[in-house]
Amino acid sequence: MSESAVTSGTSNGMSRREELLAVATKLFAARGYHGTRMDDVADAVGLNKATVYHYYASKSLILYDIYKGAADFTVDALHDDPTASARETIYHFTRRLLVGIASDIERAAVYFQEGPYITEWFTEEQVAYIREKETQVYEHVRDVIDRGIASGEFYACDSHVLALGYIGMTLGSYRWLRPHGRRTAQEIAVEFSTALLRGLIRDETVREHSPLGVEVDADTSA
């Protein structure tokens, strides 16, 4: 098959490979990785299995692309304004993370559903890549909390425990977060961040009146 066929677009603007990945993500989320066959992916996208194997030589490579996309997104969401306070940094990361999860619930579901088994599906190098990204996320959150403690912005606390708790609270939201639910992802990010930061901020006035460090109404499109 020619290169142009590999990268040709579909009616929804996706490349064929992107469409396969999107369809497989939905199937894995609904049926599990084990419960989904390459035939199922081929049928759902309207291709024969041989064509699907041209784009993805194995089902595990599809799963790895799902994992890599989710891991890369989470690390990319960490980017900070170096002039921002620790509380602003935590809020902005929470907002970007929850908005991103809400935009692709199935990818997040696959990531956590299949997490205990990736050493069976992936190569050592692939597992190492995912673990490195997860470590980067943890270390970033821990370091932001430590920065807030060192500057006097936050109360002293066990930043290791708090970082792990924060990651579980935010990333686990895929179980109940819905793009068209009662509260938007942006609003939930405000609630999460406010609750967390009011337990950390030392200054009573800041804690009460400006725990996020930003005006939320002016920030909703950020």
Image (cartoon, rainbow, N blue to C red):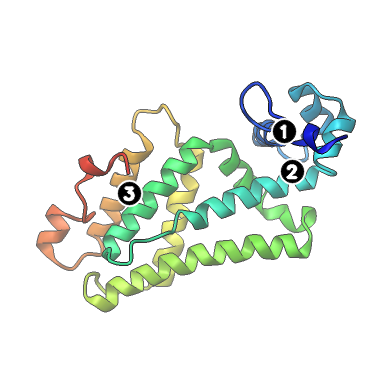
Q: Secondary structure at mark 2?
A: helix
Query: x%, y% of residue 57?
Result: 85, 44
Query: x%, y% of residue 78?
Result: 44, 58
Please name the residue that numbered disc 3 is placed on.
Answer: 192
Q: Label 3 is placed on what type of residue?
A: Phe
Query: x%, y% of residue 29?
Result: 64, 36
Question: Does residue 112 sit above or below 26 in this rendering?
Answer: below
Q: CA distance from mark 3 to mark 1?
A: 34 Å
Earlier along the polypeptide chain: callout 1 or callout 2?
A: 1
Q: CA distance from mark 1 to mark 2?
A: 8 Å
Numbered mark located on residue 20 in the image? 1
Do the residues bearing badges 1 and 2 touch, measured as CB atoms within 8 Å?
A: yes
Whether residue 20 is visible, yes or no, is: yes
Q: CA distance from mark 2 to mark 3?
A: 33 Å
Dot 3, crowdedness within 10 Å: few (<14), some or many (≥20)? some
Task: Say left or right for 49 vs 122.
Answer: right
Residue drawn at 78 percent across, 34 percent down: 4
Q: Nearer the viewer, mark 2 or mark 3?
A: 2
Most distant residue in the left direction: 205
Residue drawn at 56 percent across, 43 percent down: 108
Query: x%, y% of residue 210?
Result: 16, 54
Residue drawn at 40 percent across, 28 percent down: 181
Q: Nearer the viewer, residue 218 or 106?
A: 218
Image quadrant in which the N terminus is located: top right
Earlier along the polypeptide chain: callout 2 or callout 3?
A: 2
Query: Residue 149's quadrant in the figure?
Result: bottom left
Query: Residue 116's quadrant in the figure?
Result: bottom right
Q: Nearer the viewer, residue 195 or 123?
A: 123
Please name the residue that numbered disc 2 is placed on.
Answer: 62
